[in-house]
Image: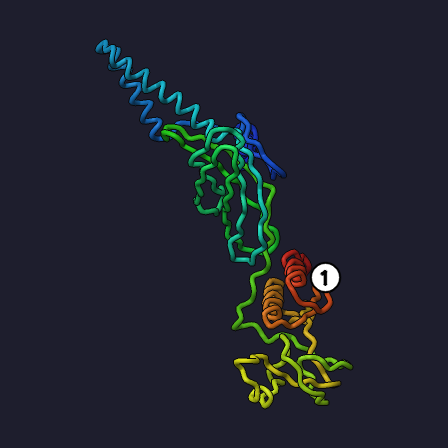
Amino acid sequence: MLTSLRKRFRDWLDRSLFQLRDAEPGEVFLTQRRVFIVPSKPGLAFAVMLILLFLCSINYNLSLGFGLTFLLAACAVIDMHLTFRNLAYLHLTAGKVAAVFAGEDALFELHLANRRKHTRYAIRLGFIGRGLPAMERATDVTAHSTSHLTLAVTTTRRGWQPAPRIRLQTRFPLGLLRAWSYWQPDSKALVYPQPEASTSTPPLPLAPIERSDGDGVAGHQDFAGIRTYQNGDSLKHLAWRQIARLDTDLDPKLITKQFEGGAVSDLSIDFDALPYDMALEDKLSRMTRWILEAEARQLPYAFRLGDNIHAAALGPAHQRACLRALALYQGAP
């Protein structure tokens, strides 16, 4: 009961006092009500010093003491205005986020636009939340310009990784006060499953099938001649005698044997073909490793994961589609 009341009070305090919001799409404008300012530790020490100066001036009737006290107090008031102005009225926009594999850092791109005639100095941005490192990045935003920076979050699991809440703060120019504001960008990173370790991954699931063209990577019945080596051809079919006769300086191309008829290899990455007793995340990690290996070896591959079925293909678009299906898969193991 007490924990529930504390949570409700904290949520009310965050939303009512500190203007914490849910994800904010598009451009966000930091109005006056979204910027908060309090004295810093040096500022509190400065305030105590002013009080002591004022009391001493009263006690000893020091005219110069009064002058010094009011002069320093005026400097503090000006510093308050400049600190607040340094952060208020900024325009914030979230940029693109590249997909990553689980365990890697998701890099969130942020844009700070300053459409005023004064430069903003030493604005620090950092993610806040439980389990997040207390790391901030500082930037200056000159007049009528935009500053770009990225903040990193280490991913731990596949799926969508929303951007944590961001705190912007500044102590410019004197450091006596701290102004800050909160921003929840409407940005998220797609996290692919972590690839299985290459040392424990079995070979690619190449299945022999019968084809009439025989122009595959493993056909070996009727010799039909030679041709230039292509990515995906088996190294076992290299025509070493013909290669030895070539001048490698003038013609560095490899030559492979071509066969007609017979069996060729068909690569299919199928979720249902994996061992039944494997854990779901282990299956997805293995399929991820196979996709990366097939792309590296330039072997066209088919893909099947529940309702996501892709014919044999190769290339960045095919790879992204397959990895996205793995990242967002919610089926039972």
Could you say which quadrant of the image residue 289 lies in?
Answer: bottom right
Could you say which quadrant of the image residue 33 lies in?
Answer: top right
- Location of residue 249 with respect to 284 vertically, above or below: below
Q: Residues within 10 Å of mark 1 (few under 14, many from 20)?
A: few
The scheme the figure's colours follow is rainbow
| Amino acid at pointer 1 | Asn
Asked whether residue 208 is in view, the answer is: no
Say which quadrant the C terminus sits in.
Answer: bottom right
Q: Would you say 106 lies left or right of 208 here? A: left
Say which quadrant the N terminus sits in.
Answer: top right
**Frontmost residue, 329 versus 121:** 121
Residue at 62 percent across and 83 percent down: it is 255
Q: Would you say 80 lies left or right of 207 here? A: left
**Frontmost residue, 196 versus 330:** 196
Question: Callout 1: helix, strand or loop?
Answer: strand
Residue at 69 percent across and 87 percent down: it is 225
Residue at 65 percent across and 56 percent down: it is 328
Image coordinates of residue 70 in percent, x first then y, are 32, 15
Image coordinates of residue 32 in percent, x first then y, are 53, 25
Could you say which quadrant of the image residue 101 lies in?
Answer: bottom right
Report the residue marked by disc 1.
308
Q: Would you say 222 lies left or right of 193 here? A: right
- Location of residue 262 with respect to 2 vertically, above or below: below
Q: Number of labelled discs?
A: 1
- Location of residue 196 with respect to 94 vertically, above or below: below
Residue at 53 percent across and 71 percent down: it is 198
**Frontmost residue, 317 versus 154:** 317
Asked whether residue 38 is in view, the answer is: yes
Identity of the residue furthest to the front in this view: 250
Identity of the residue furthest to the left in this view: 60
